[in-house]
Structure formats: structure tokens, C-alpha cells
Amino acid sequence: MTRTLAARRLAAAGALAAGSGLLLLVVANLLTSRAGFIEMIADGVTAFIPVAVFSSGLETFGPLAKGLLHIGVAGGVVVAAALLAVPAARATASMGWLRAGVWIGLVGIVIAEALVLPLFGAGFFGANAGTDPVALHVPLAIASLGYGLLLSRTRTRLQEPAPAAAEPDQPVIVVPGERPVGLTRRSLLGRSLALAGGSSLLAAFGSLAVQALGNVKPVAALTGGPTPADAFGPTPALTPVPDFYQVSKNLIPTNVDGSTWRLTIDGLVERPLSLTLTELIALPSVTGYRTMECISTNIVRGDHLIGNQKWRGVRISDLLDRAGVQPGAGWILWEAEDGFTESTPLEVAREADSWIVYEMGDALLTPEHGYPARVLIAGRFGMKQPKWLRRMQMADHDEDGYWVVRGWDKEALVRPMSRTDYPRTRTSVPVGEAFWLTGIANTGDRGVMRVEVSLDSGTTWVDAEVEDAAIEPLGPLTWVRWRHRATLSAVGAYSVAVRTTDGSGLVQDGVVTDPLPSGATGWHRIRLNAVAAG
């Protein structure tokens, strides 16, 4: 066997040997719902990607972007395993397969823990990972040792001399319960490894693909249907919790045991606190309706990363008063169970509308929305409101949060936005017959002063009717729904645009910008086809 052919076979064996380890890493993440090796690398990759490239990927792939990133990282792990196989097998050529396998596995652990994790920002042996160390290190160690043993065993068989060629007409004799005569131990092992490794790789990548698709919801589900549900269109004033958008840095939600969970309040405080969920719920509470919007919402595209719901929790200021803030403290540094970090200025945290909530829609938060507790900061995009909260540390300095490090806006103030939900774009409308245009508008905590509609792509504007924001489930911190009775006067194509003005008089900007870094601007437009009546 030539040296090149041997290297190719070893590389292929390395890729297949990595299959079981990769599957273990994926399954461990599903079972623990805590960030593991693949998630740590994905986090690091996003920190290195230039802002322009990040924005382009987000615009191109939308909700699939996160899943595709994880699939790419998993592919990189397999490639790395294939490249490592050749020097590892040659370095252990004189060892027995068991000793060699353990040696290769230990080298893999050291490379992953002392080189790869620090390279991608998780720190030496994951010291900066901010996640459950057991969920990170144990699956990684088992996967690496399994890879080493499988590779070593395969290497031993690959080095065995090939058996003498059988006569062309020699039959393969099969005896029930025995290995077929003519099927060598080496070929049987090779086929078994190929089957096991290939199946594991397929299962691992298939699981990641399913998780990626799980982040995509049909527009009809998000808007309540393609036809109006009431006088203000298909989007309900109150978003059902199952349809409420959810975005995080993770591919799957983080599951937290509420019975053992604690909220730690420490740092520059007089009386550090550690509150159970029961103790948090027992404190004086506040309740209200609030709209939450993701900073990655593309207004021009009419994205649906926004929802309105009822929340219950406690004011952050009440917790700070219980802990006693020391002089010199000016920031709250937040930490979440998934390693997510953010910060809030003390004066913002003390505002009456800054809460830590534990209920959504008259029930405890779901894992997707941050159970046991999450932060709500009025007028800010969702990236400033961590889910799965575990610690609030008072500090005399600020630290850039997870998304701020990756180039997103530090303040993340909600921009005026509006959207047309009905009719859908490219709908045909009879000339001269009145029809309803309906949609939503949001301005964060500044209130909606007006909504305007244009039937000529923004040349002229008319006021739309806005739903009464004083009637539940609306309020001063929620979106509003709007409607306008329109009539198209002539056959042809119409470009319909919508814009809103907030309570301070700021008109929604018509200049199109990407969501990154400060939230998108522009007007949502739909195209209508006016056709002859009858």
C-alpha cells in the first residue's frame, strides 16, 4: 500500500471514527440543554465574523442561519478528526491498539481544551464558557477517547497484510451463525466501522438539521392566518404564547430546574441575596402588557420577530433596595444559565418599567421564553433582556454583552416600525371596490402617535385608524394595530407602504438599512394588482 493511499484511508477512518463522538456531543446538548463543545465553537465563530458578513448571512438565511452555523461547526470537527488521524496513527504505530487509543484520546482532549476552546473565546479548559462545566467537559472527554480507540483499532487492522486473493470462481460459503467464509476479519471490521460511523454522522447532522428547521415558523402561524380574524386584521392584539417569537444564541432552549434554581444578587451590594423561585414569586409583583421585538427584525421584509403578551414579575428597583446598592455602583452585569451576558445602567434598571419576570400569559415562563426568570427593559430590543437569568451583579464598570461584543448596538433602543399584514403582497383587488389594509406598528416605550398609509410607494400619505391603546391587551408599552379603508382607482400595479410616528414626533425612517448593528430602518411595502371588477 502506498504512503498516500494509506494516509487517505487513515483520514477516512478518522472521519468515520469521529461520527460516534459527534453524535454524543449532539445528544448531550439535547439531554442537558446546556452549551457543549459545538456550541462553544459556534459562539466563538460569531465573535470572529466581520459585521458585514454576519449581517449578510443573517439576511440571506434568516432563522436558518444559526442552525447552518452549528452544522458547519460539526463539519469542521469531522474534518479536524480526519486530519488528526494520519499523524496520530503514525505516532502510535509501535503501540498496542488499546494504549494507542487512550493516547490519541488524551491528546485530542488536550487539543480541544487547551487550544481550541481558548482560540474560540471560551478560555483555557473552558474557564470563560459561563456554562455548566459537566455538560461541556464530560461529553467532550468521552467523545475524544471514543474517537481515539476507534481510530486505533481501525489503524491496527489497516496495517494487517491483505489475505491472499481468492480464486475468481471461489464461492463465499455462508454458515448460519458464523462469519461468511471469504469475508476477512479486516474487511468485516472495516464495514462495521463504516456502517457505525456513517450512521452516527448521519444521525448527528440529521439532528442538527431538525433543530435548525425547528426555529422556522410559518408566517400564517405568526400572524394568526391569511385572512382577517377581526376588524384589525389577521394578527391578534395578544400573541398566543406558542406563537410568540423566540430568539437566542442557542440552537435549543435552555432547560432549568426551577426547584434548585437561585437568582444571585451580589457585587457592590450591602446584603447579597440568593432567591429561590418560590421566594421571588412571593415578593410584591407587577403585571402588565408589553411588546417585545428582536433587533434582527427586517422591517422592509415584514419580519415577524415581534409579539405582545402579558407579563408578571418584580421591579428590579425593589430587588436592589432589598440588597442595598453600595456607593460607586453604576451598572448591573447580567449572567444567564446559557452563558449569555448583558449589562444595564443603574438608572435604567431603577425605572418603574424595568422588571424581572417569571410569568408570561398568566402562566410560568416556558423554557423557550426564559424559565424560571428573565429581564424586561422597556424600550429596548430583546437582546438587552436576558432569559434564563441566574445572576445580577452590581459593578462600578460596564462590560459589553454577548451581542455587543459581536458588533450589535450597545443601547439597542427600539426604532419606530410598522407592517402590513393584510392583504398579502401580490393580491389581486378589484378596481373601485373598497377593501381593508391592516397591520401593526411599534415604537417601544414612546407610544404611537399616528400610522400613515401610501398607495403610491410613499409619494402621498393618508392617516390610518389606530386601535385604542388604552384597552387591554394593549397599553403604553405595546404595539398597536391599524387599519385603513382603501380603494384602487385604475387597473395596474400598486406599491403600498406604511409608516408610523412615535409619541415624541419621530417619523419612521424610509431609508433602508440592515438590522445590524442598531435595528433595521425602511418601510414595509406590499404589491397589489388592481384588476377590472367583475
Image (cartoon, rainbow, N blue to C red):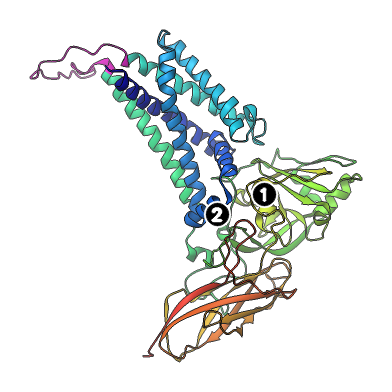
Say which residue label 2 marks. Answer: 55
Q: Secondary structure at mark 2?
A: helix
* Residue 253, horizontal then vertical, whole percent: 58, 46
Say which residue label 1 marks. Answer: 404
Residue drawn at x 49%, y 15% as measured from the top left: 102
Q: Which of 84/479 is in front?
A: 84
Q: Amino acid at mark 2?
A: Ser
Left-right relation of 388 to 142: right
Is 56 magenta? The answer is no
Q: Answer whether labels 1 and 2 touch (C-beta < 8 Å).
A: no
Q: Secondary structure at mark 1?
A: helix
* Residue 252, horizontal then vertical, whole percent: 55, 45
Q: Residue furthest left?
A: 169
Residue 462 appears in view: yes
Q: Amino acid at mark 1?
A: Val
* Residue 459, horizontal then vertical, whole percent: 56, 83
10 Å neighbourhood of mark 1: few (<14), some, or many (≥20)? many
Is 168 magenta? The answer is yes
Location of residue 75 (image quadrant): top left
Q: Which residues are magenta?
A: 158-186
